[in-house]
Image (cartoon, helix red, strand yellow):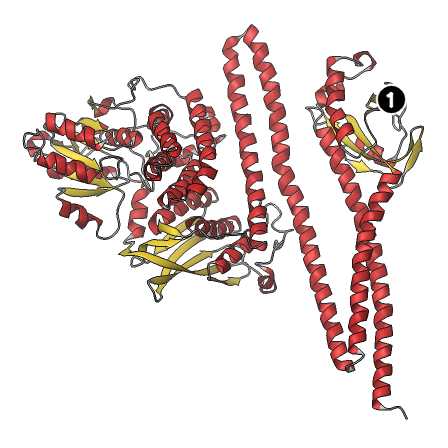
Amino acid sequence: MLSKRSLSTKIILMVECILLISSILFCSVSIYRSRVGIRKSIQQRMLDIANCASGSVSGEVMKKLSEDTVGSISYTKIYDTLAVFRDNVELEYVYCIKQVGEKEFIFTIDLDQVAPAKYGDPVKYTDALALAAKGRASVDEVPYTDQWGEFYSAYSPVFDAEGNVAGIVAVDFSVDWFEDQLSSQTRSTVIGYIIVLFISLLVGAVLSFTTVRPYVKAQAQLITEKIRAESANNAKSDFLANMSHEIRTPINAVLGMNEMIIRENHKAMDLAASDPMLVQDSLENISVYAGDVKKAGHNLLAIVNDILDFSKIEAGRMDLLEAPYQLSSLLNDINNMVLFKAQDKGLKFTVEVDPSIPDELSGDEVRIRQIFTNLLNNAVKYTDKGSVSLKIRSKKLENNKLNLVIIVWDTGIGIKPEDREVLFNKFERLEMDRNSTVEGTGLGLAITKRLIDLMGGTIEVESEYGKGSIFTVTIPQAVVSGEPIGDFQTRLKERLPGDRPYRESFRAPDANILIVDDTRINLTVAVNLLKNTKIKIDTATSGAEAVEKASKTGYDIIFMDQRMPEMDGTEAFHKIRDDENGASKDVPVVCLTADAVIGAKEKYLAEGFSDYLTKPIDNYALEKMIMKYLPEDKFERVTDDPLTSAMKEEAGDDEFAILRSVGIEPKAGLKYCQDDEELYRSLLSEYAYGEIEKAHNLQKSYDNENWNDYSIYVHALKSSSKMIGASALSMRAAKLEAAANAEDGGTIKTEHSSLMEEYEVVTAVIRSVFPKPELMNEDSNITEFPADDEIMEFLPSEDND
């Protein structure tokens, strides 16, 4: 009778034998399947090279190739283009093919430097070549032999402008190259499986000194890990397949639009000689195409940024930069960014903020903004009808900290219970078949989860499939100031233009007021906000100028901005009051600022200001304020004269199409303009021609590393860009404003040049479409002209100091 030890040993040995046989079989099958996959990967690589080569060739030029064109400019152009692939890629030969019969193909261009085929020489027929002739890029499944040797070839069609196959670009790879690629990659796979096999046997040997049960348990664990590894590998493959599509889409747009730019450029040169008046049309087309290239480039950059962010997190190189920031400013930016995306899909977007939350917090604003953006963009993308809501709450912690609670709720497609476990996994996109039209890398939530983990926060998900989802994020933040954010909802509603038709409340042609603001756009739009009242308006662009004008002119009211360089509004106000001989020493001075948190009004009234008006200014609130302080004999109330400004649709406007090409959304600007298209056009001109000095000051403060002044000027650029609908430029400026406030010179130096380049592109395109306003003199100063002669009306934005 066998002893327990002997029986246990035999059982263990038997299990080890079974394990060995199973492992060998598993490795063999896996190696075979891997070899098939490797073969497909190599073929795809061949196809990518062929597609890239064919994409660099013009179908119109290839269509015209003939024996007579050999050596011509067009022939040489194609030859030189394809020579780059011949000289720099591992392929053997590259050449162009033309179909002349059902199964007959001839050489048109052969780049072989030793024994090139001549035009018209026959090309060996293969099934892959036949598929390419029908418009489908293909690669040979089996090698073929011709007079040059034995090859695998990849074929990619070249299409003309009508979408017909104009020719085929073929690339040959030697059989030796193909087999070497297959062998080397297979060898790596085999080594991996040998390591797995060795580990399995080693585990079995160790288990021979224990009992069967732990061995079985370990084997089960090994199988589980294998399944997880395969699942991760499959997810990675799906991700790479999706990235192939996502990355190729903007690249194809870049190549296509670049071709159109080249064509329009040739067209413009031809028209310059025959009909110069038509050159402008071609130039406008070039601007549109260039804008499309830029958009595609930004899309590609967003994809790459997602991948780079994730790689940084995975490598442990993602550092958090904590600095003070204003929650209200961040929420304004988020609201403006998401609102129009939601409206474009017919969705309702709401923001609810607990008024007791402190407004000034400390944390990594850039990464917190990224969390907001990822969650809200996902909610909008996966919601086709209904609404998306953002709720902000807080929970007090010790040591002057709080938990910032972010709740994103949507009525979208929801998440299946079985998918929640992999929702934040890397390389995962849920229901890719159903959501194939939704753009993105699939890394957004994975990045969000890891950022939240880095901040010491949590994220929870509640969802009912088909009805919607709720994401709840909790992030600890330090409190810089206990001053609460206040009634954010009301202020947010006031920032958006309502549906009520505008009519001026009064007319006061004999009254004279002074408006002070260091941002030219803010001045011009404020002037035009009052243009129908006929009131006379002087303006000043600095505190010092305001003091000088107030000393010489007796105004009825002064509206004083607060945040200005060198001399702020409060200092200027006190200088006016202290000027014993000043003509406006005792006139009402109204504080004009975006500082709308609880306690701000009391602070400015305590300084001595007559009243307080928050920005962005509502036209009714401004007129009400003027009637409050203007002597009654200087204004006449109006009750029955409605404003008759034209309400124009901008959808079919060619000029607006050009603006969209550089990221300006006229629809957003028009909403802030009460849909007055004429005023919106004037504001665009003001932005392009009147803010040049501010841009110079911004650059100067950057060169001098004066981050305090830099914050002021980039703040102005953020506000004015938002007014015209350039939200991307505004958001970039907001990021740099936050960096300047935190004295983060590294971020500023990294991002500043991109900001200025984008600003130059935007202003250049505006100048190409809209003329310089006649009233704008060379020194770009607005001064002493009646409101009804002005050119623009005030546009609300989220922050206009």
| Residue 242 locus on image (x, y percent) | 65, 46
Number of callouts: 1
Disc 1 crowd rating (10 Å Cα; few below 14, some 14-19, many 20+) is: some
Q: Report the residue that reaches farthest toward the top.
A: 274
Q: Which quarter of the figure has residue 708?
A: top left
Whether residue 215 is visible: yes
Q: Is residue 399 left or right of residue 515?
A: right
Quarter in which the C terminus is drawn: top left
Taking depth in this image into account, of 45 and 530 the one nearest to the observer is 45
- Which residue occupies 44% across, 28% down? 762
Q: Which quarter of the figure has residue 624?
A: top left
- To which residue does mark 1 refer? 116
Indicate the secondary structure of the residue bearing disc 1. Answer: loop
Taking depth in this image into account, of 405 and 91 the one nearest to the observer is 91
Q: Is residue 696 left or right of residue 44?
A: left
- Which residue occupies 35% across, 39% down? 707
| Residue 256 locus on image (x, y percent) | 63, 28
Q: Is residue 6 above or below residue 241?
A: below
Q: Is residue 218 above or below residue 744?
A: below
- Which residue occupies 71% across, 20% down? 60
Q: Report the residue that reaches farthest toward the bottom.
A: 1
Kind of residue sitting beneath label 1: Pro
Whether residue 443 is visible: no
| Residue 555 locus on image (x, y percent) | 12, 29
